Amino acid sequence: MKIIVCVKQVPDTSGKVAVNADGTLDRASMQTIINPDDMNAVEAALALKDQLGCPVIAVSMGPPPAAGMLLELKAMGVDKAVLVSAREFGGSDTFATSQILAAAIKNLGVDKDDIIFCGRQAIDGDTAQVGPQIAEKLEIPQVSYVADIQKDGDTITVKRMLEDGYMTVQVQTPCLLTCIKELNTPRYMTIRGILDCDNEPVTVLDYNALKDDPLIEVDTIGLKGSPTNIYKSFTPPRKGSGMMLEGSGKETVEKLFGILSAKHII
Ligand SMILES: Cc1cc2nc3c(=O)[nH]c(=O)nc-3n(C[C@H](O)[C@H](O)[C@H](O)COP(=O)(O)OP(=O)(O)OC[C@H]3O[C@@H](n4cnc5c(N)ncnc54)[C@H](O)[C@@H]3O)c2cc1C
């Protein structure tokens, strides 16, 4: 049994968000972090490794600097780090990204007992589509919004978060689970992990390594193979200044109620 975790390096949107003149994100001038939901996915994988002794492989698609993030994961306890990186993969939308990641996962092999973890969503693209699309392309079952995991043989019982409660789902391996922050608290890197993390170099899967997979066709990967393209991006206009409502408490509540109803907010 092994666990594969998909991890994305994202701009730290809690800090300065820089935008180029053409409206695209100026990623080069922004700090990068490991996508927060992916940290929960890594912790879930490492907790299962603590329990069952299975190896954990982290896979990330991104430019070469993403290798640094993968070393941080090795310092936390991940056994192998794989960077999926090639010019041909650039500009991929979620369909193309999931094609490439599914091909990379097939390259690593998916066995009967294996589990693939993703975060629920990335804080930059914010679509929450990549995990479910990878599962579809690998033709394995998936459960999203996972808030608790119990493994018993090849059956996994998960608590899936809904808007107003939880659902308990049983799923057979191999399967893909997308993780949310309620699942756990990610651990820190260890001193031993930091000292050992670059003993084994990060494995790079480039275009040549994946090109023979049927998922890697010119018309299904990269900018040209993406069915969607970003036509325009812009910063939303700032909201206008606040409005003071004058009068007694009851009067102002009635006015506020009228304004919010007119805007269909309540
Ligand atoms: C319409 C559209 C057009 C786009 N065009 C471009 C473009 O031209 N150029 C460009 O650079 N980007 C483009 N993007 C962004 C790019 O598609 C996304 O960064 C990428 O597909 C991941 O989607 P997401 O960020 O929404 O991830 P989500 O679906 O929210 O991520 C869910 C989970 O999937 C996994 N995951 C996602 N991405 C990766 C990854 N790269 N490596 C490993 N695991 C991952 C993680 O576990 C993550 O938590 C476009 C996006 C859209 C929606």
Image: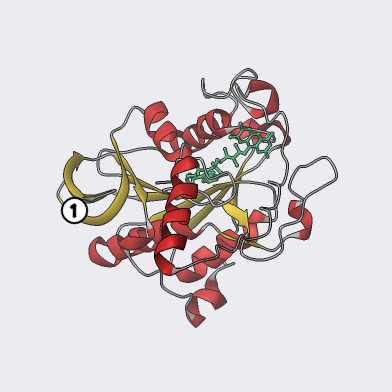
Name the image quarter holding residue 140.
top left
Residue 3 seen in the figure: yes
Closer to the camera in the image, 8 or 11: 11
Closer to the camera in the image, 133 or 14: 14
Question: Residue 248 placed where, x, y %?
Answer: 45, 68
Residue under pointer 1 = 151
Element on which disc 1 rests = strand
Q: Residue at x 69, y 22 (%)?
A: 224
Residue 121 seen in the figure: no
Q: Residue at x 77, y 55 (%)?
A: 28
Query: Horizontally, is 26 left or right of 251 in the view?
Result: right
CB at disc 1 and ligand 1 closer than 8 Å: no
Closer to the camera in the image, 188 or 259: 259
Question: Residue 171 placed where, x, y %?
Answer: 19, 40
Seen as rendered, the residue at the extreme bottom is 191
| Colouring mode (rainbow / by chain / secondary structure / one colour) | secondary structure
Quadrant for ligand 1 reads: top right
Query: Horizontally, is 131 left or right of 246 in the view?
Result: left
The type of residue carrying mark 1 is: Lys
Question: Residue 216 placed where, x, y %?
Answer: 57, 24
Question: Residue 192 placed where, x, y %?
Answer: 49, 80
Q: Residue at x 69, y 27 (%)?
A: 223
Query: Horizontally, is 152 left or right of 237 in the view?
Result: left
Callout 1 environment at 10 Å: few (<14), some (14 to 19), or many (20+)?
some
Seen as rendered, the residue at the extreme top is 219
Q: Residue at x 51, y 70 (%)?
A: 75
Number of marks in the image? 1
